[in-house]
């Protein structure tokens, strides 16, 4: 095993954690030593992150808070940066990689103060606030979308399009052929709600599907993630419509379900979008309107512009509108198949490898070897 140590700075939502997990798996496979720095929320990570020595520091978000909460968060960020500085002096990592979110800010700031090589990864089509704060200080910026908004012209030379690293089981489905949608074959629809505002999906989707022609309804095979409080209501709606549906608050076999799906309906968070693209599945995306800086809308627009899916803003997302969209799509398999090809061309199943290559190139040991 190499003596080089790579520190990952991540925490918060799955959009920040999943790519860190994918990179960890790739780097562990290459024999690197790894460590994880996170805030107090990062207590019980599984997968590759669960194998790493984890260090906890203070951090705090600022967006959307009142003045007193902001002052408290700024103090926490300051304390966390000092904690990270001491940690970096002790560990002496070769490279530090941050995945956005305020959990990563103290570690990345401390690493730039210590002149340690640094990379930030942006999961969304709009540079997040934490990454905007760090972009001018770090050595490299890895992006998930070719056209990432919010980048300063002065930082463009640092940018490398790696794509969004996805979990290994998702990446393994990148070669799964698009399922047949002709004739009387089943039509699989995967609905991923996530934790933010998923109730609107539970309210609209069953009603929209019930409005479809009987010939299409008879072919539907729905897998839908619901919030616990919506589960009984959604189950009853599908039973009344006679539509086959597999429901749960957590879908533990998403890779298999996604590979079998003809279409995904989802929020437009980084994880859901990147996984659909990696597998090559078209999607109807309903951006969460209260996401920070409306970043989900940027993600959905990027997918829509590439022909890999369709954006439906929440204020126009109703049963009639969705039923009309689904009727036109499910009745035209060629349209879905073309969108699936566009999704596959936009997806980057090799993103973890590309990001790992970027990390390795930046490591002092690698640069000494090349000289």
Image (cartoon, rainbow, N blue to C red):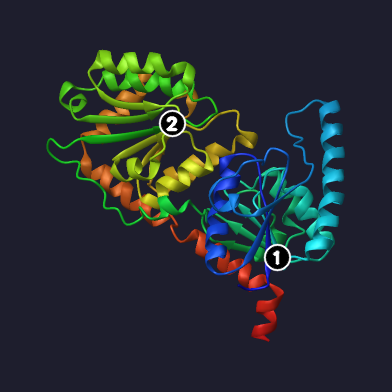
SS state under label 2: loop
Q: Left or right: 300 with respect to 290?
A: left
- Nearest to N terminus: mark 2 or mark 1: 1
Q: Residue at x 63, y 73 (%)?
A: 2
Q: Residue at x 75, y 57 (%)?
A: 136
| Residue receiving disc 1 | 95
Please identify the quadrant where the N terminus is shown: bottom right
Mark 2 → mark 1, Cα distance in angstroms: 40 Å
Does residue 148 appear anywhere in the picture?
no
Q: Residue at x 50, y 32 (%)?
A: 194
Pinpoint residue 223: horizontal percent, then vertical percent: 34, 31
Pinpoint residue 294: horizontal percent, then vertical percent: 60, 35
SS state under label 1: strand
Does residue 140 appear anywhere in the picture?
yes
Q: Residues within 10 Å of mark 1 (few under 14, many from 20)?
A: many
Q: Residues within 10 Å of mark 2 (few under 14, many from 20)?
A: many
Q: Left or right: 216 with respect to 6?
A: left
Nearest to the observer: residue 146 or residue 365: 365
Pinpoint residue 18: horizontal percent, then vertical percent: 55, 47
Is residue 246 depicted above or below 348 in this figure?
above
Farthest-out residue, bottom: 371
Pinpoint residue 3: horizontal percent, then vertical percent: 68, 73
| Residue receiving disc 2 | 312
Evaluate if marks 2 and 1 touch, with contact meaning CB atoms under 8 Å apart: no
Farthest-out residue, left: 183
Query: Which mark is in front, 2 or 1?
Result: 1
Q: Which mark is residue 221?
A: none
Nearest to the observer: residue 337 or residue 359: 359
How many numbered discs?
2
């Amino acid at each position: 095993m190499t003596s080089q140590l790579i520190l990952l700075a991540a925490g918060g939502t799955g959009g920040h954690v999943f790519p860190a997990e994918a990179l960890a798996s790739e780097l562990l496979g290459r024999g690197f030593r790894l460590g994880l720095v996170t805030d107090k929320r990062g207590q019980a990570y599984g997968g590759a992150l669960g194998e790493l020595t984890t260090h906890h520091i203070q951090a705090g978000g600022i967006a959307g808070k009142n003045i007193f909460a902001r002052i408290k968060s700024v103090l926490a960020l300051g304390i966390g940066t000092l904690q990270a500085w001491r940690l970096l002096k002790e560990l002496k990592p070769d490279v530090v990689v941050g995945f956005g979110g305020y959990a990563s800010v103290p570690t990345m700031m401390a690493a730039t103060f210590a002149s340690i090589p640094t990379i930030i990864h942006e999961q969304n089509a709009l540079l997040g606030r934490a990454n905007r704060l760090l972009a001018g200080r770090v050595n490299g910026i890895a992006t998930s979308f070719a056209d990432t908004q919010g980048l300063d012209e002065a930082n463009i030379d640092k940018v490398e399009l790696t794509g969004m690293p996805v979990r290994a089981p998702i990446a393994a489905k990148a070669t799964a052929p698009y399922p047949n949608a002709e004739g009387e074959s089943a039509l699989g629809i995967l609905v991923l709600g996530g934790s933010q505002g998923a109730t609107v999906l539970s309210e609209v989707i069953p009603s929209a599907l019930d409005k479809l022609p009987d010939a299409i309804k008879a072919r539907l095979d729905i897998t839908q993630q619901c919030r616990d409080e919506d589960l009984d209501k959604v189950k009853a709606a599908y039973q009344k419509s006679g539509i086959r549906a597999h429901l749960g608050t957590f879908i533990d076999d998403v890779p298999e379900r996604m590979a079998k799906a003809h279409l995904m309906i989802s929020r437009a968070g980084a994880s859901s979008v990147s996984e659909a693209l990696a597998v090559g599945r078209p999607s109807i995306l309903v951006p969460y309107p209260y996401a920070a800086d409306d970043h989900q809308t940027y993600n959905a627009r990027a997918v829509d512009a590439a022909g890999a899916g369709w954006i439906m803003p929440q204020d126009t997302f109703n049963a009639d509108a969705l039923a009309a969209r689904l009727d036109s799509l499910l009745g035209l398999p060629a349209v879905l198949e073309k969108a699936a090809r566009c999704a596959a061309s936009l997806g980057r199943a090799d993103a973890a490898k590309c990001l790992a290559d970027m990390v390795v190139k930046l490591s002092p040991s690698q640069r000494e070897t090349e000289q």
